[in-house]
Amino acid sequence: MPVFKAVESPAFNYGAIVQALEESVRHNLTDGLLLSGGLDTAMLAYLTSKWVKPGCVTVALRGAPAPDVDYAKLVASRLELRHYVYYFGDEELDENIRAVIRIMKSFDPMEIRNDVAIYVALKVGREQGMSTIMTGDGCDELFGGYSFLFGLTKEQLDIALKKLWANMRFSSIYLAKDLGVEVRLPYLAPQFKALATDLDVGLKVKSERGQVWGKWVLRKAFENIMPPEIVWRVKVPIEVGSGTTILPPLFDSRISDLEFSQKKMRYLNEDRVVIRSKEHLFYYEIYRSMIGVPYMGASNAKTCPDCGSNVEQGASFCRTCGAYPI
């Protein structure tokens, strides 16, 4: 029996969006779900539970603030879903970080802080017998969930979203493939994606309750279906929700100032790679040992000024080293 009770809102009738997402979910059912307790994955949990009861996975760095855990517990308990909460410690970090760098071929700190949580969650899902796992990837890109979009005019927002759509890539696909599991992304299913990209951008980023919200139309569509603390939860990056945002000070304590200064200069002179922090240095040395020095693959392509890697046309950041803006 569903616990989230649907109540039609006479002021905002966005049932067509709920129905379209429901249809996308129905065609992408899985036995697992990465559950952050944010809007994106909570909507998937609610809709999926109409047909199956997937096992839900939430991970957090042990000893770090990890707000995802309590929100995910709320969703899983309301829907009576099996919920696996896994806390990983420092001793597992190096192994999982090395795997993420190998798979994603990146030493971008932001990418790695997010991806290591996803990788651990996918591993937990596999260990629990899940062969197909659903993720909320694509929702922020399609519906303007990122805060850097909030101050734009409608015309600027339209341009920025189209740029996001042209360059979006989701690490869960590559990480899952390496682990031998399949991920399914209902937000990116062709029909739902088409609906989302055609939607007026004014419905995506909008003021409500005295502040600007991304994914506004989805929040309104689900506000009488799911708990308000989930529907109106402010988006946080995966690194914040899982606690991996504390990694920079961790590496600051591991690497001395002298070592950092010497190696930063060495890699700039020898490899022509700009190292921005001790965390960046730690990741680059793993990247360098496993993949090699970054290089320009095509002479006529756009290149990153900080590491020399090729960058997709239209991209404003480097996927290899994380340089931004370029």
Image: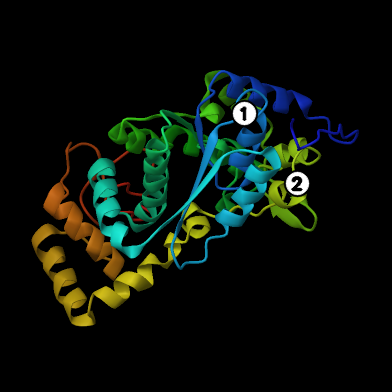
- Look at label 1 and name its amino acid: Thr
Which residue in the protein does label 2 denote?
Answer: 227
Which quarter shows the N terminus? Answer: top right
Q: What residue sits 62% from the left and 50% below the top?
A: 73
Relative height, residue 106 to residue 195 (above, below): below
Going by the image, does 277 lie left or right of 39?
A: left
**Dot placed on the residue nearer the N-terminal end, 1 or 2:** 1
34 or 302: nearer the eye?
34
On residue 204, the disc is none
Q: Position of residue 216 (x, y in %)?
A: 71, 43
Residue 27 is at least partly visible in this image: yes
Residue 277 is at least partly visible in this image: no
Q: Secondary structure at mark 1?
A: helix
54 or 35: nearer the eye?
54
Q: Position of residue 289 (x, y in %)?
A: 12, 53
Q: Position of residue 195 (x, y in %)?
A: 63, 23
- Look at label 2 and name its amino acid: Pro
User: In terms of image quadrants, where is residue 273?
Assistant: bottom left
On residue 48, the disc is 1
